């Protein structure tokens, strides 16, 4: 029996036959099918060594940061568009055009 195999009995929920640990499907950046959930390391690749697990963590962190920045940018752009449309003194949106 491989070292550590006793920690993952074959009857555990989500485990593979033979007692290997569960694996969560993810793309190369660690994104899973669940929105807002990323994985890295041995939960995504059970054969990953320490260095590749650390690299996967760095990649997942960069993907998380990108997703958060993108979300904030979309929100800020939406607020700016609202201001352009409804504040006469802000830009040249429809409200400013009707000031005549």
Image: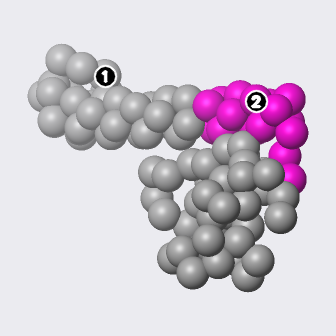
Provide residue 63's location: percent of width, then percent of height: 64, 38
48 inside magenta stretch: yes
**Along the viewing direction, whichever of 97 and 44 lies nearer the viewer:** 44
Q: Name the residue under label 2.
A: 54
Q: Which residue is drawn at 84% across and 46% down?
A: 48
Provide residue 41's location: percent of width, then percent of height: 72, 43
Whether residue 50 sits left or right of residue 95 in the image: it is right
Q: Give the range drawn in magenta.
A: 47-63
**Along the viewing direction, whichever of 26 and 17 lies nearer the viewer:** 17
30 inside magenta stretch: no
Q: Establish if 16 lies above or below 81.
A: below
Instruction: Report crowding for label 1: few under 14, some 14 to 19, many 20 or more residues within 10 A (C-alpha).
Output: some
Q: Which residue is drawn at 47% across and 34% down?
A: 68
Instruction: Report crowding for label 2: few under 14, some 14 to 19, many 20 or more residues within 10 A (C-alpha).
Output: some
**Protein image colouring:** one colour
- Residue 66 seen in this snapshot: no
Image quadrant where one finds the N terminus: bottom right
Q: Does the residue at mark 1 contact the one at mark 2 (Cβ under 8 Å)?
A: no
- Residue 1 seen in this snapshot: yes
Q: Main secondary structure of the magenta part?
A: helix
Provide residue 84's location: percent of width, then percent of height: 27, 31
Q: Residue 91 carries which label?
A: 1
Q: Establish if 28 lies above or below 22.
A: above
Question: Label 1 to label 2, Cα distance in Å?
Answer: 47 Å
Q: Which mark is residue 20?
A: none
Q: Earlier in the sequence, mark 1 or mark 2?
A: 2
Judging from the image, what secondary structure is the residue with disc 2 in? helix
């Amino acid at each position: 029996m491989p070292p550590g195999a006793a920690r993952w009995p074959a009857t555990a929920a989500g485990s593979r036959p033979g007692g290997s640990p569960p694996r969560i499907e993810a793309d190369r950046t660690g994104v899973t099918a669940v929105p807002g959930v990323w994985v890295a390391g041995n939960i995504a690749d059970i054969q990953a060594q320490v260095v590749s697990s650390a690299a996967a963590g760095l990649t997942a962190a960069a993907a998380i940061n990108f997703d958060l920045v993108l979300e904030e940018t979309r929100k800020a752009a939406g607020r700016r568009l609202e201001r352009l449309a409804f504040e006469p003194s802000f830009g040249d949106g429809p409200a400013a055009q009707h000031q005549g």
